[in-house]
Each structure stands twice: as structure tokens, then as C-alpha cells.
Amino acid sequence: MKPKLAVVGAAGRMGRRIVALAAESGRFDIVGALENEGHPEIGKDAGLVAGIERLNVPLGSSWPAGANVAIDFSLPEAAGKTLQQCTANGCALVMGTTGLTTAQQEAIKAAAQKVPILYGTNMSVGMNVLFAVVGKVAAMLGEDYDIEIVEEHHRFKKDAPSGSALTLAQSICKSTNRPYPDTLIGGRSGRDTLRKKGEIGMHAVRAGDITGVHSVIYGALGETITLNHTAHSRDTFVRGALRAAEWLLNRPPALYSMADVLGIK
């Protein structure tokens, strides 16, 4: 039986692609497309809003009956409502919203005791492989290698540094016994910015329509190693989220990650 999918933030940039690729795949039954009350697209067909054929699923603000898995890449302000609706309706949730507060992250953990939730700062398969290896590389190279993280995104992204950049830093800190987030240095300016041993530089670029570029630079006297991931389009994240939604369905309540989906230890 196909997963019965609700898409939260269905009129947004990511939401439209989730609707389009879920419909294109033929592996989902899209039963709901949600937006805030008063959104100008409310009432319009979700397929037409997404630039595909009519799906006979109007954009609405009420939780759809029968949905058993939801995908939410909307704004942090909507996270609480999504969690409430999923727990009240026994609906599994794939949450990809970044910029969440500590309180919101704790709310996700609490909700995951009632329904299966997969939360990730980046749903790209390739990016999750990068998450898994950056800490191992740092540990193998040792303390003589300086580490800098550079992330690049489009001009419309609100939060910085990106959630994915922070996840990279967390992986490195865990593998090298650095304190997180105290080790992070957000950019540098001024006359005395000499790098301190063990710190991790964090740099955010916002320009044009860059989908997402993350680079981890390991530098020592004599050589530099750079691990890089470049997303060519938002569809990379959407395909990962759809894969996660299929995997998550019928799992027991718990907080999962893309590493679980991919079998990364």
C-alpha cells in the first residue's frame, strides 16, 4: 500500500518540489498539501501550484484525514503545529526544517516518543555520507591539521551557519573530543585574528541562487585536504526525504536520522 503523504509548506520552494517528485514517482498517495491560513495559494490545486498536472488535492490549512506520513521543510514557526498534528493523528514525520531552537529540538525528541520522526539538517544521500566521514578524517589527521568549514547558500536563506554546517562540526567535535559549540569560530575580522590551535572556523556565504555547497578544509604546513559536497538542485534533498518517508512508515516511535535510512554506523 502506498504511503498516504501530507506535505507541510506545500507552496514553498521545497514543498512544491516534494509534491512534484512524490507525484512523479508514483510511490505515494498525496492526501494533503498544507499552508498557513491566509496564504494566497490556499484553495488552489497542489499539483498546479507545483507546476505539474492537477492532483485534485487543494492547498489547505487543516490536517488531512488518513495521512500516515508527513514531510515538513517549512519555517521554524510551523514546527510546533506540525508536531502536534502528527502526534494527535499518529502520523510519522520527516522533518527537514533548519534553524530550530533548542526548545524546538527538545519538542521533537518528546514527540518521537509517540510517533516515528526522522529529523535531519540535510536529506541528501551524499551529504549524509559526508557527515559520516568528516569526523573520522579529522581524527586520522590529528591535531596538526587546522579545520575550516565553508557553507554557501542562496540569498534567501535566513539562518547561518547552515544546519548542515553545524552537523559537520558536531561530527568533527565528537570524533576529536573537542567541546561543541565552544570550539567554533564564526568568521574572522580585525587586526588580531591569529587562529588558535584546535578551533574550527565556520564561514557562511549567501549569494544568488546557490542551492548548497559545503566544504571542510583540513590544512597543515605542506598540504591541504578538502572534502566537498555540492547540491545541484533542491531535488537532491527532496529525493532523500521521499526515500526517508518510505523507510519511516510503520517504524516504532523513535527519533531517527538519515544515517539510519542509509545504514551508516
Image: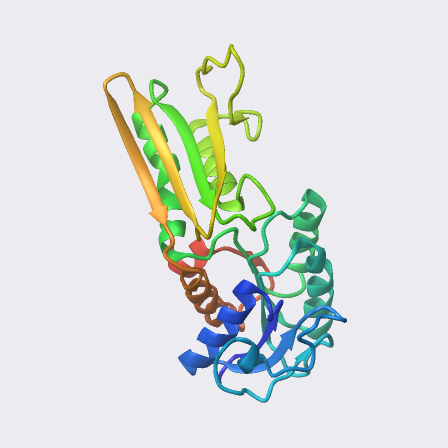
User: Based on the displayed image, in which of its 4 quarters is residue 86 positioned?
Assistant: bottom right
- Name, please, the residue furthest toward the top: 192
- Please tell me which residue is depicted at 46% across the width and 69% down the height of the picture: 242
Q: Position of residue 44 (x, y in %)?
A: 64, 82
Colour treatment of the image: rainbow
User: Based on the displayed image, in which of its 4 quarters is residue 108 positioned?
Assistant: bottom right
Q: Position of residue 32 (x, y in %)?
A: 62, 79
- Please tell me which residue is depicted at 71% across the width and 55% down the height of the picture: 77
196 vs 37, left or right, is left
168 vs 146: above or below: below
> How many dots with numbers?
0
**Front position in the image: 175 or 100:** 100
68 vs 24, left or right, is right
- Name, please, the residue furthest toward the left: 222
Q: Position of residue 232 (x, y in %)?
A: 36, 56
79 vs 18: above or below: above
**Front position in the image: 51 or 252:** 51
Q: Position of residue 20 (x, y in %)?
A: 48, 75
129 vs 47, left or right, is left
**Front position in the image: 153 or 103:** 153
136 vs 115: above or below: above
- Please tell me which residue is depicted at 73% across the width and 77% down the height of the picture: 62
- Name, please, the residue furthest toward the front: 208
**Front position in the image: 251 or 207:** 207
User: Based on the displayed image, in which of its 4 quarters is residue 117 positioned?
Assistant: bottom right
- Please tell me which residue is depicted at 44% across the width and 74% down the height of the picture: 21
